[in-house]
Amino acid sequence: MSTVAVTDATFDEEVKGADVPVVVDFWAEWCGPCKQIGPALEELAEEYGGKIKVAKVDVDQNPDTAAAMGVRGIPALFIFKDGQVVSNRAGAAPKAALKGWIDESI
């Protein structure tokens, strides 16, 4: 399963209503660190298969959700479980660190 693009309009359904934990990546096209972690998140989405969902929210096109979540810097990552935030982190990290964080949180 690859990453899913989520918008302000689909956030509640895709993230809060998901039946598996969701890793949400708030990013932007112009953000260098966001581009650094993008491939790792794609790989993790594939590796976890249907166990988790990886959602990407472009903050330039979807400012309402980013504001509601209190995102001040990107990349900002949140893990939702049963519709609630269970963990979050900011900034780029290597794939192994992201995997460890996901495993701890789900």
Image (cartoon, grey):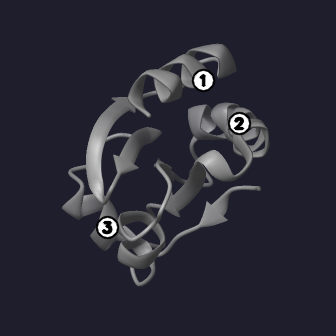
Separation of disc 3 and disc 2 at Cα?
A: 23 Å
Rendered residue at 62%/54% (across/down): 29
Amino acid carrying mark 1 in the image: Lys
Q: Nearer the viewer, residue 24 or 27?
A: 24
Q: Give the residue furthest to the bottom.
A: 9
Q: Which residue is mark 3?
A: 65
Query: Which percent across, then down, holds residue 50?
Result: 68, 53
Judging from the image, what secondary structure is the residue with disc 2 in?
Answer: helix
- Residue 74 visible within the image: no
Judging from the image, what secondary structure is the residue with disc 3 in?
Answer: helix
Asked whether disc 2 touches disc 1, contact meaning CB atoms under 8 Å apart, the reply is yes
Amino acid carrying mark 2 in the image: Leu
Q: Which residue is mark 1?
A: 99
> For the residues carrying marks 3 and 2, which lies nearer the camera in this image?
2
Separation of disc 3 and disc 1 at Cα?
A: 24 Å
Asked whether disc 3 touches disc 1, contact meaning CB atoms under 8 Å apart, the reply is no
Residue count near mark 1 (Cα–Cα under 10 Å), binned few <14, some 14–19, many ≥20? some
Quarter where residue 45 is shown: top right
Sequence-wise first label, 3 or 1? 3
Rendered residue at 41%/40% (across/down): 76
Rendered residue at 43%/64% (across/down): 15
Quadrant of the snapshot with the C terminus: top left
Quadrant of the snapshot with the N terminus: bottom right
Q: Nearer the viewer, residue 45 or 33?
A: 45
Sequence-wise first label, 2 or 1? 2
Query: Which percent across, then down, holds residue 83?
Result: 30, 60
Q: Which mark is residue 27?
A: none
Q: Which residue is mark 2?
A: 44
Judging from the image, what secondary structure is the residue with disc 1 in?
Answer: helix
Separation of disc 2 and disc 1 at Cα?
A: 7 Å
